[in-house]
Amino acid sequence: MQLENYGNFPQTIPLVIEDEIFLYPFMITPLFLENKENIEAVENAIEFNRLVMIAVSKSGKEGSRDKDSFYDVGVVGNVMRKITLPDGKVKVLFQGVSKAKIIDFVPSSNIFATVDILAEETKNDIELKSLINILIDNIKKLSRLNNKFPADLIKAIEENDMPSRVADLVSSVLKIKKDEAYKIFSNTNLEQRVIGIIEIVKNEIESYKIQKEITQKVNSKIEKSHKDYFLKEQIKAIQKELGADNQKEEEIKLFKKRLKAKKCFMGQEAYKETKRQVEKLSRMNPDSPDASLLQTYVEMVLDIPFGEFANVKFSVSSVEKQLNKDHYSLEKAKERIAEYFAVKQLLEQRNIEDLKSKGTVLCFVGPPGVGKTSLANSIAKALARPLVRVALGGMEDVNELRGHRRTYVGAMPGRLIKGLIDAKKMNPVIVLDEIDKLGSNHRGDPSAVMLEILDPEQNHEFRDLYLNFPVDLSQVIFVSTANDIRKIPAPLKDRMEFIELNSYTPNEKYHIAKDYLIPQELEKHGLKKDEVSISKATIELIISKYTREAGVRNLRRVFSKLFRKVVKKILENETITKVTIGIKDLKEYLDNPIFEIEPADKIDVVGVSNGLAWTAVGGDILKIEAIKLKGKGDLKVTGNLGDVMKESSTISYSVVKYLIDNKILKIDEKDIPKTFKEKDEKELVDCSEIYKRYDIHLHIPEGATPKDGPSAGITMALALASVLSNRKIKSDIAMTGELTLSGKVLPIGGLKEKLIAAYKAKIKKVLIPKKNYERDLEEIPQEVKNSLEIKFVEKIEDVLKEALI
Ligand SMILES: Nc1ncnc2c1ncn2[C@@H]1O[C@H](COP(=O)(O)OP(=O)(O)OP(=O)(O)O)[C@@H](O)[C@H]1O
């Protein structure tokens, strides 16, 4: 279609104002017209076979035909077809012919405008060509990002050698906003127009790239959240299938129910804290690790037996009965325990509530195996309360008692709270075993924690760190045990009442074995009384040669070992109805004997004296050895001695020197080493030269065992006196006593243990301080007193007189 066929320009032609599409020359475009003027203009063009000018309305001014409501540059073309649609609208097919500009608009007619063709100019063909190439490149790039430019379209663009057509075509595909499209289209400089289009294509490429990136990110996020969502849904479905979902709800319900039941017994703070934690738990995902920790906490708290009490009545008679039933002898201890519960019973009968739970804590002190724990057992049995044993010996951290805070990995309540849970009662008997082993090497302050537990002023509000609320321990009966009273911290000692238990004599052991250990062990092994017979002599031999202990723990083990073998024998041979165990059989049953305290040396020697020692595991014989070596009066002391014992050796040495100087201890002149000159001239030398010309070495075996205390004073002095005077010491004599610098003998502790040790070592005579002789002999078992000659000594001279030959 030729433009010339339509006459010269400028000319006045019908004007259509298009609201939607920005038209370009050579485009064949369907247009939908509903505006009366537009329809009239089209009809006029068809009727008179004229061209029509299509101008585009400015943004926001659609529907108006005012002069400045549309762009003045548009397209002239012809109407190829016109169809009137059923709704009154008119559809026309328009073919653009040329770019044109409205020179004049005729508002009176309203459908006509005077229009001129707008020619485009090119300044530089080569530049234009390059710009077209750049444009095509960018279009190709864009086509990789979206599908606006299909391959055949790109091909058509490439093959078109009219730059203005390429520009029109590309612009029409890009769907540029009207005002921008107008700006580019109305430019008559073709290079500038192509540059404008390139910019738009590039912007579009950038924005697509960004869009793509964002889409990818969003997609991956959406994918992840979708994945999570689906997984969670699946878990839920599985849990539902397994009933776990309900299970959690059920559990929380149960916790709340149990908590409600305990509310009035557990105290407000405890109730509030637990309630808070149950609520927190109900909001948690049951699979999270925190939830399982919290669940353990809630379960622990609800397991504490708040409000549950075993028999609350105290009955002295039943305590006494049980103690007597379970223990041989131990009269003093039994009496003291009975008194303790008598007070409690009276306070209860007279309803003096607040004193009932107060008072001191019983502490059984003595060597291992003498019945400390077993007395506590009997107390619990008699009071019909559960017994909880808390071993303090192996404890490394005091927080094992008080619990670890919940922030601590693997936190748990302390042993006391666990004890209550195990006992299922709030008033058990708790035995704090080996309270003396709670030393300062523990982490934390053990005595402060123990005070919190034992002090009635504090223990009704004992705060376990794990629970984080106070628990009332005031109804608990605490009993403690210790081997060595000296190792218990002073503030704790103040709260305790000590009941001393001593080593058993062989005779006591025999009775315990016969009346308690053997019947109990027979029962444990399923044996009847008449199936085993052990003679008295056999039991005594077992005591003296197969056990080496202050108590009877190993003795019990020996019987258990014997009876295991008896059981085996009976099972192996059904004809056996009774097994007799005699002295001869012991070797077969028990291997070689272990000697208890070794009997003292039978030979009297110079410089070896027998001391008596008290240790946490019972009494012992302490041999003290002294030798003299040529020297110049030094004293060397070995044997792992503590400071007090070292001082005591110095005192002993000074006392002995004093005795020599004052001729109380006679020195034979022959024993003093002399110089050749003194020998030749037969010079007399002073007796003091004996200690000036010799060095003395004092040793107390066994070197690996630490020893301390002043009670070996007289024994060391005796050894020193013996070695310096060269007089022998009687081997069957032993002694104990502190020595003062003026030679007086002061009293000592642990006499009973020491005398029992002397008795076991077959010592004949024992020298003890006068004060002990007058005060403590009553407590010494008769069999010991019968077999030992016990003599008191007041001063060192008495010792020398008795012991030196
Ligand atoms: N007087 C006694 N009568 C009967 N049995 C006794 C007597 N003394 C101790 N026993 C028994 O000896 C065994 C050891 O006693 P127990 O465990 O009470 O010793 P312990 O003094 O607590 O020792 P440790 O200090 O090592 O804890 C127990 O089986 C106990 O029954």
Image (cartoon, rainbow, N blue to C red):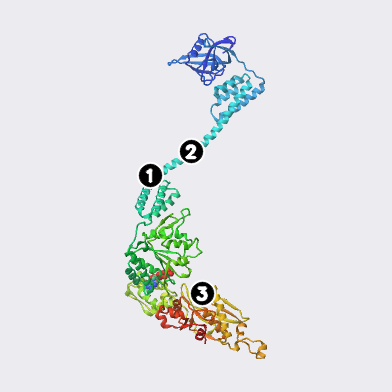
- Label 1 sits on a secondary structure element that is helix
Q: Which of marks 3 and 2 is nearer the N terminus?
A: 2
Q: Residues within 10 Å of mark 2 (few under 14, many from 20)?
A: few
379 relative to 164 in the view: left or right: left
Query: Callout 2, which amino acid?
Result: Glu
Counting other residues with Cα less than 10 Å from the Cα at mark 1, is it few (<14), some (14-19), or many (20 or more)? few
Amino acid type, callout 3: Gly
The kind of residue on which mark 1 rests is Lys
- Residue 240 is marked as 1
- The correct choice, above or below, for 261 with respect to 778 in the image is above
Query: Residue 666: where, in percent of width, then height?
Result: 56, 87
Q: Residue 223 carries which label?
A: 2
The image shows residue 792, relative to residue 124, as above or below, that is: below
Report the number of numbered marks.
3
Label 1 CB less than 8 angstroms from ligand 1 = no
Q: What element carries label 2?
A: helix
- Local secondary structure at mark 3: loop
Q: Distance between the residues labelled 2 and 1?
A: 25 Å
Is residue 327 left or right of 799 when viewed as pictured?
left
**Residues marked 2 and 1 touching at CB (< 8 Å):** no
